[in-house]
Image (cartoon, rainbow, N blue to C red):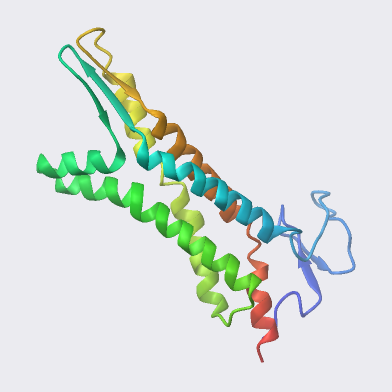
Amino acid sequence: MTTAHTAGFVACDRCGLVYAQDCADCTRCGSALQTRAPLSLQRTMAWLMAGLIAYLPANIYPMLLTSTLLERQESTILGGVVDLVHHGSFGVAFIVFAASVVIPVGKFLALFYLVFAVRRHWAMNSHQRHVMLEIVEFIGRWSMIDVFVVAILSALVQLDTVATINPGVAAVSFALSVVFTMLAAQSLDPRLIWDEAEATP
């Protein structure tokens, strides 16, 4: 399989302009040209582990703190999904569960798989793996739905001593987890995925 690397070309990571591999710097934006991002797998794995560490307390500690005249209620992510189901809001419960559990776990599994596939030189369909990375990068920006809901409720429901809604520790942890996984996806050099295709006749 012929790729830009085997043909002797390298693209600028910043502006995309293509050069011969013997060029050192991009004449358009001035950034250094490199055929592969150095320590890409190490940076990706570090961001992934940081995201996983932040994701655990996001599911253990309360996401939402609701205070009224009579009681104070703490809601975790899964607890909020169960409450929505009990109130008959199945559609909202499905969206929250998908955005808070299914998508984050799917991103972790996909990125771990890509890192180990490249590191262990597993036989792979490079096009499918590249599409997987593109999907992870695309859905990463839509994973903040819980944080947005908490922020909106906290801003709108502030009725002094009658009722208040405040974000919990899980909101910060979940936001950090999303940011870390987005950085992990951006740190993985997709050209490493195609190196296996070059080695396959």
In percent of the image, x 27 and y 44: which residue is there?
A: 78
Residue 156 percent coordinates (x, y): 28, 20
In percent of the image, x 41 and y 56: which residue is there?
A: 105
* Left or right side of 131 for 190: right
* Left or right side of 199 for 101: left
* Left or right side of 141 for 94: left
Residue 127 percent coordinates (x, y): 54, 76
Which residue is most to the bottom?
Answer: 201
- The C terminus, quarter of image: bottom right
In percent of the image, x 18 and y 18: which residue is there?
A: 71
* Most foreground residue, 29 or 77: 77
Residue 112 percent coordinates (x, y): 53, 63
* Left or right side of 92 for 130: right
Relative height, residue 115 to residue 56 (above, below) = below
- The N terminus, quarter of image: bottom right
* Most foreground residue, 51 or 127: 51
* Most foreground residue, 129 or 81: 81
In percent of the image, x 59 and y 49: which residue is there?
A: 47
Q: How many labels, in total?
A: 0
Image quadrant assignment for residue 171: top left
Relative height, residue 40 to residue 200 (above, below) = above
Residue 186 percent coordinates (x, y): 60, 53
